[in-house]
Image: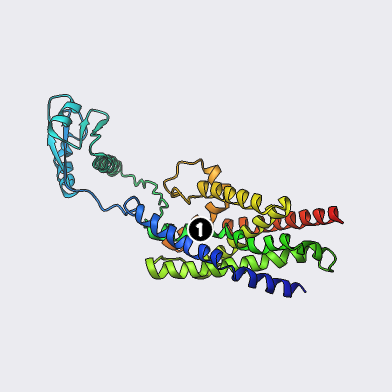
Amino acid sequence: MIRYLIKNNFKLMFRNTWILIIMITGPVLVIAILSSAFSELMKSYEGVDEFSVGYRVEKDSPLSGYIESIKEAGKENGIIFYEYPEGDPKTVIENNELAGFAEFTEDAYVLYQSADYETEGTVLEYFLSKVMSESINMSLQMMNQAAGVDVKLPVQQLKFMPAIDSKDYYGIIYIVYFCWCGMICATSVLSNEKKYGIERKFQVSDLSDFQLYMSKLVPITLTVSLGMAAAVLITVLLFGIHWGNALISTVIVFMMILAGASFGMMLYNISNNLVITVVVLFTAVWFMGFFGGSFETYMFSSMPDIAKQLSPIYHGNRALVELSCMGHSEYIASAAGYSFAITVVCSAAAVLAGSIRKRGRA
C-alpha cells in the first residue's frame, strides 16, 4: 500500500507541468540574471596601472639610507616616488594628483591616501608595510650576526579562499535556494486530498501516521531532485558552472532537498492549510537565504557571523562553493549534519502533528 501511494503521488507531482517548469527554469533564469549583473563585482583582482606618490624623509629616520632602494623597488611594482621636502602632504596630493604621500619620521612613518585612488592607496599601504617588515628583518639579522646569535622569526601561513566568479557562485547557491522551496511540488497532491476528502479515507486504512508522511516526503524529494538535476545540467551546459567533488556535492544537495521537504511537510501538518504553509515556507527560506549568502555573497556580507551560522543555507552554500574553488571545505560535515538534524526533527514534528490532528477527528 505504501509503495502504491508513493508511486501514485510521484506520478501526480511529475504530471504537474507548470510546477516542474518553474522548478527547472527558475534557477536557470535567476542564475543567468544575477551572474551577469554581479560579474564585475566578483572579478578577480588584476592589479593597477603605474601611479605616482610623494614622500618626505627626516634625517634621523632609519630609512633615510634605504630610500633609493625603496624607490627602485617601488618602480618595479608600478609605484613612482617623488620627493617633496616641504608643504602640507594633503595639499601636495591634491596639487600633484598623487595617489598618496609617505612621511618617514625618526620612529615611524605616516601614510596619507587620496580618496580618488582607493585601490592604489591600498597597494601603497601594502608595499610600505612590506618595506618596514623587510627593514626590521634586516636590522635583526645584522644584530644577530654581530652578536653571533641565530634567531628565527616565526612564520604563519594564512588561510585564504581563491577567487570564484559570479557564474560559479550564483550557479551553485541558487540551486541550494530552490532546493528549500521544493514543497511547492506537492501543492497539487495536497490540494486534491483536501478537495476530494482523501485524508478522511486514509484514517480508516491500516497505514500508520509515519507511512502516510513518507508517502508524501519520498515523492517530493524525488521530484525536486530530478528538477534540480535538470537545472544543474542546463546551467553547466549554458554557463559552464564548475562544481567541486561530484559525489560530495550531490550528497549535500540531496540532503538540503530532504531537509527542505521535511520542513515544508512539518509546516503543512501543523497548520493543515496549504496557503499558510507556502507563505511561511517562502518567508523562512527568504530569511535563511538572506543570512546565508543567497542575495549578498557571504564573502562580502556584513551580517554577524552567529546569524549566518544559524542558517542551514549558509552551511550548504559555503560547503559547495568552497568545494568548487578549493576542492575541499570545513563546512561539509556541518552542511550534511545540519540538514540531517532538520530532517529528523521536522519529520518527527510532522508525524506527531498529523497524529494529533487524526485523533482529533476520530
Q: Residue furthest right?
A: 362
Q: Is residue 211 above or below residue 347?
A: below
355 relative to 239 in the view: left or right: right
Q: How is the image coloured?
A: rainbow
Q: Is residue 357 above or below residue 100?
A: below
Residue at horizontal 55%, vertical 60%? 179
Asked if residue 164 can be seen in this view, the reply is no
Residue 256 % position (x, y): 58, 60
Residue 150 % position (x, y): 34, 47
Callout 1 amino acid: Ala
Disc 1 marks which residue? 319
Q: Nearer the viewer, residue 132 or 345?
A: 345
Residue at horizontal 51%, vertical 62%? 22
Asked if residue 284 can be seen in this view, the reply is yes
Residue 66 % position (x, y): 17, 39
* Res 63 quadrant in image: top left
Q: Quadrant of the N terminus?
A: bottom right
* Res 123 quadrant in image: top left
Q: Is residue 13 above or below residue 77?
A: below
Q: How many marks?
A: 1
Residue 29 % position (x, y): 43, 60
Label 1 SS:
helix
